[in-house]
Amino acid sequence: MSEEKKNNIPIEDGNEAEEKAGKEAAEEAEEKAEAEETEDKGAEASEESKEKAEEQAEDAAGEKKEDEPSAEEQESERYMRLMAEFQNFKRRAAKEKTDIHAFANERIVNDLLPVLDNFERALGGEAEASENEELKNYAKGMQLIFEQLKAALEKAGVKEIEALGEDFDPNVHNAVMTEQTEEYEDGKVSKVMQKGYKLNDKVVRPSMVAVNKKS
C-alpha cells in the first residue's frame, strides 16, 4: 500500500466522526427545542388556567356582592322591623288598657252576685201575695232597691245570661242534672237553679241549669 493511501484513511475516519458528532448535536438541539416548546406550552396553559380561575373568582365575588343588601337597604329593613314591633306593642298596650277598664269591676261583681241571688229569693212573691199592707209595702221597697242594684250592675257591663228554653251551651251553661219534660224540646234548658252573668261579654258566672233529655 502506498504512502498516499495510508494518509487518506484516517482523514476519512475523521470526517465521518465529525459528521456523526454534528448529527448528534443537531438532534440534541432539536430535542432541546422541542422540550422548551413543550414547557412554554405548559406554562401558557397554566397561566391561562390561573387567569380563568381568577376571573371565575371575581365573577363569583361580584355576584355575591350583588346578592348582599347594601348598608342603606339593611338600615331601611331594620327601621321597618322596629316600626312593626312598635305598632304591635301599641296594639298590645291598647288592648291591655281596654281590658283593665272592661274587667276592673269583675271582682266586685263576683262579690255582689250572691247578694243579687238573695234579693231574688227574698222577693219570691210571698210578701206581695200577703194581705198584710205593711208587709206588701216592705216588699215593694225591697223590689225598688233590687231594681236599682240591677240597674247599677247593668251600667257597669253586667248582663244576665239567657238560659230557660235555650239550647244548652257549655260555654255559658253549667248542667247539673237532666230531666224529662214535654214542655221543652230535647237538649233545651228546662230549669234554671242559679242565674248566670256576663261582664262585658266575658262569662263571670255560668248559669246552673237542668237540661231536658228525652229517651
Image (cartoon, rainbow, N blue to C red):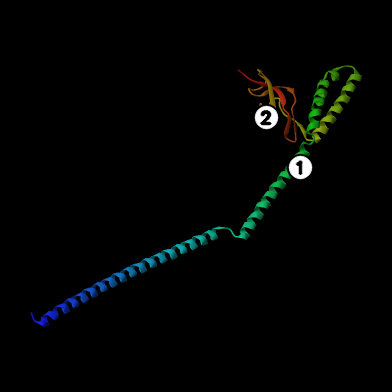
Q: Residue at 63% x, 55% y: name it.
A: 77
Q: Where is residue 179 in the image (x, y as percent from the top left)?
A: 66, 18
Residue 27 pos. (x, y %): 26, 71
Image-quadrant location for residue 135: top right
Q: Residue furthest right?
A: 134
How far is disc 1 from disc 2 in space, using C-alphas? 26 Å
In the shown orientation, is residue 57 left or right of residue 7?
right
Q: Which of the pair 147/13 is nearer the observer?
A: 13
Quadrant (top left/top right/bottom left/bottom right) for the N terminus: bottom left
| On screen, residue 11 above or below 147 | below
Apparent side of residue 58 relative to residue 139 in the rendered image (left or right): left
Upstream in the sequence, badge 1 or badge 2? Answer: 1
- Where 117 falls versus 11 (above or below)? above
Which three-letter amino acid code belongs to the residue tagged 1?
A: Lys
For label 2, the crowd category at 10 Å Cα-Cα, with few meaning under 14, some 14 to 19 and many 20 or more, is few
Q: Is residue 43 above or below residue 210?
A: below
Judging from the image, what secondary structure is the residue with disc 2 in? loop
Q: Mark 2 points at which residue?
A: 171
**Residue placed under numbered mark 1 in the picture:** 97
Residue 146 x %, y %: 84, 27
The one of 31 and 50 positioned closer to us in this rendering = 31
The residue type indicated by label 2 comes to Asn
Crowding at dot 1, Cα within 10 Å, few <14 / some 14-19 / many 20+, comes out as: few
Tell me if residue 200 comes above or below residue 19 in the rendering.
above
Residue 155 position, x and y percent, is 81, 35
Residue that appears at 33% across and 67% down: 38
The quadrant where residue 209 appears? top right
